Image (cartoon, coloured by chain):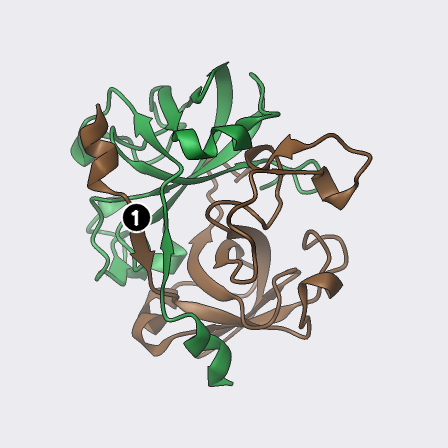
Chain colours: A brown, B green
């Protein structure tokens, strides 16, 4: 049983890009994109630029980021930072503080300019590393 | 401009769990969960078990995995492995082969048994490391 788990004690990712946003701090960012977040630029690193081929304005995509300012030792939070709400496991919330602080951002592609995508709305702050970009699938449009 | 990018040349994640599935190889796995994939167990590591608190049967969640058998040097593919389809950047496809091979699996929670979730349908193969678990949000039910 344990062999598979032990085969991957940790893994490393290399950012494929970075968010360039007018949002400069966590305190000023809305909790989710649709809650008033701005559009931003996603700058893709040169090594991965070819992988953008096929993305077009109007596409619905999912951007995965690494919340580099998050705490990784938090397992329970008050949802939406509301102390009146019961402490809840972070896997049942979208708290950025979690063991692997990956952000999941559904956004629309506004423009494609060489290795840069204008996307939004997105609540990730300026300088947030980007891990991956995925299209939303017609076969399960809910994700 | 480059300071933020350089601040995170790479980052490490620690798996929070592992998939236990009857699917044992990539070749036998459907390309997406709704295409006939089975249910599977998601075993959460002891260190992260508290973070499950609040998840219940019937919940719609997103499981993020690490495709440990994927190739990370692939930037373009024929979508759905169909050679008749034009070579396309991996960020415009859901190919498991990509620079950071993160899998995004929308699933339903069937059962919760201590630190194990029965989930499905899910196309990830046995032994796939799990990076994160997130609830689907009412404020953007599309993701």
Of residues A132 and B68, the one drawn nearer to the viewer in this rendering: B68
| Picture coordinates of residue A118, whole percent (x, y) | 57, 71
- The chain that hosts pointer 1 is A
- Residue located beneath label 1 in the image: A10
Residue A115 visible in the snapshot? no
How busy is the neighbourhood of tag 1: few (under 14 within 10 Å), some, or many (20 plus)?
Answer: some
Compared with B114, A63 (above or below) is below
Compared with B133, B6 (above or below) is below
| Picture coordinates of residue A31, whole percent (x, y) | 70, 52
Q: Which residue shows up at 33% across the image and 70% down it?
A: A48
* Residue found farthest to the right: A84
Which SS class for mark 1? loop
Q: Quadrant of the N terminus of chain A?
A: top left
Q: Which residue shows up at 54% across the image and 72% down it?
A: A127
Of residues B49 and A51, the one drawn nearer to the viewer in this rendering: B49
Asked if residue A122 lies left or right of residue B45, the reply is: right
| Picture coordinates of residue A55, whole percent (x, y) | 44, 63
Compared with B53, A67 (above or below) is below
Asked if residue A127 lies left or right of residue B96, the reply is: right
Of residues B7 and A31, the one drawn nearer to the viewer in this rendering: B7
Quadrant of residue A44 in the image? bottom left
Residue B46 visible in the snapshot? yes
Compared with B12, A118 (above or below) is below
Q: Which residue shows up at 47% across the image and 28% down it?
A: B49
Quadrant of residue B86 in the image? bottom left
| Picture coordinates of residue A134, whole percent (x, y) | 43, 53
């Amino acid at each position: 049983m344990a062999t598979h788990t032990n085969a991957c004690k940790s893994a490393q990712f290399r950012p494929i890009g970075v968010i360039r946003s007018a949002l400069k701090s966590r305190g000023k960012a809305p909790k989710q994109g649709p809650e008033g977040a701005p559009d931003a630029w996603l700058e893709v690193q040169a090594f991965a630029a070819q992988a953008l081929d096929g993305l077009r304005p109007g596409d619905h995509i999912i951007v995965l980021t690494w919340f580099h300012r998050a705490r990784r030792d938090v397992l329970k939070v008050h949802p939406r930072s509301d102390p009146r709400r019961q402490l809840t496991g972070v896997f049942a919330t979208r708290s950025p503080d979690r063991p692997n602080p990956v952000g999941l951002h559904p956004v629309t592609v506004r423009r494609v300019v060489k290795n840069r995508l204008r996307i939004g709305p997105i609540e990730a702050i300026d300088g947030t590393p980007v891990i991956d970009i995925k299209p939303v699938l017609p076969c399960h449009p809910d994700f």
